[in-house]
Structures are given as structure tokens and as C-alpha cells.
Amino acid sequence: MAQTKWILDPAHSEISFKVKHLMISTVTGYFRKFDLEVITEEDDFTKTSGIVFTADIDSIDTKNDQRDAHLKSADFFNAEEHGSIRFVGTGIHVEDDESKLKGELTVKGVTHPVKVKVEFGGIAVDPYGQTKAGFSIKGKISRADFGLTWNAVTEAGSVVVDDKVKFSGEIQLIRQ
């Protein structure tokens, strides 16, 4: 069977992340600019031969300009030297009745294998005749694993920013 290329529908997709702040509340942020391309061997996504996701660090939005600037600085992502996050998927596998996408995540020049939960929403044709596929993804990583180690300690001894970062995405792809 011929390969099928799928590209991101940015109007119907979003990527967010959540991090505990002062260990008492959670801050949510978004990447406003990101891209995803998937190559499948089958239209039902049972076999993929290429998955590449990138997120533009300069598009981070936590609804706080000062915090966004700090995240883009050398203390965190160092957007000047490392302008994007990159994930290259190696395949979707079923583990314990859940679909998991395995791949290599690169943040700030550091690459580690990661697994994310994937829920396939299905395939539909929109009113304009475009075939689309939908997915929900969830995962978590350790900031320290990727060199994002900035932190401070409060007077009470709590850390300002948790090491664990949860991320999720609602993704819609368009068949080419």
C-alpha cells in the first residue's frame, strides 16, 4: 500500500503543559506555534513510518509576559540557542490496553526516549471534503532530564517549580 502523508490542522489542534508552582497550585502554558507531520502505511494509523513534531519555544504562552520571558531565557529553554522542541516518533504500540507512542524527545539539545498515551478519536471527512484524523495525547517528563534545572526554594523550604511537567495535546491531522 502507498504511504499517506498527514499534516497538522493548526486551527483544530493545541498543545499545553502544566507545572506545579510552589507545590500548591498548577500553572498552565501553551505552545502557540507547533507542527506535526505523520506518514502512515495504513489509513487507520496501525502502522506509521514517520512522526515528527516540533514546537517553537518563542511561542510559549502562560498568560504572563514576565514568566514567558523567563521560560525563554537561558534559565530554562534558552530559546536563543535552542529555538524548538522536537519529538521523533518511533511507533505506536499497545501496552496494558492503552496505545503508547514511543519516540525521542529533544529539549535544549538533550534527547531522551519518552512514551506518551495516545487516544485515537477516529477519521472523518469535513464539510470541505478534507479527510481528518483526531488524537488526544498525554504524558509527563522530568525537567531535570532535559537540563531545565532552574529553581528556587521558599522560606518554608518548598521548591518554586516542580520537576515533573505534564503535557497534553488535542491534535487534528489532514490527509494529503
Image: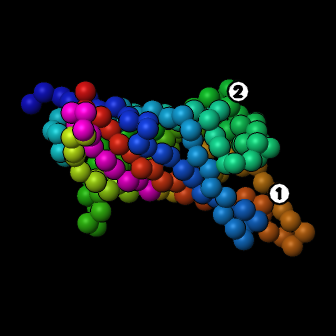
Decide which of tag 2 and tag 1 comes sooner along the chain: 2
Q: Residues within 10 Å of mark 2 (few under 14, many from 20)?
A: few
Residue sitting at 79 percent across and 69 percent down? 158
Q: Magenta residues: mostly which secondary structure?
A: strand
Reading the image, the residue beneath label 2 is: 80
Q: Is residue 131 magenta?
A: yes
Residue 13 lies in the magenta-colored region = no
Residue 127 visible from this viewpoint: yes
Q: Residue furthest right?
A: 155
Image coords of residue 173 (percent x, y): 32, 38
At 67% from the left and 48% from the top, the residue drawn is 62
Residue 50's place in the image compared with 31, above or below, is: above
Q: In the image, residue 87 lies at what x, y percent?
A: 45, 38
Q: How many marks?
A: 2
Percent position of residue 132, x then y = 26, 40
Closest to the observer: 167 or 10?
A: 10
The range drawn in magenta is 127-138
Report the coloring of the rendering: rainbow
Left or right, 65 with reference to 91: right
Marks 2/1 in contact by CB < 8 Å: the verdict is no
> Could you tell me which secondary element the residue under label 2 belongs to?
loop
Q: Residues within 10 Å of mark 1 (few under 14, many from 20)?
A: few
- Residue reaching furthest to the left: 1
Q: Quadrant of residue 133?
A: top left
Name the amino acid type tagged 2: Glu
Residue 176 shown left or right of residue 21 in the figure? left
Q: Look at the image and tell me in which quarter the N terminus lies.
A: top left
Identify the residue shown where x is 63% and y is 29%: 82
Is residue 104 visible to us here? no
Q: Which mark is residue 152?
A: 1
Q: Amino acid at mark 1?
A: Ala
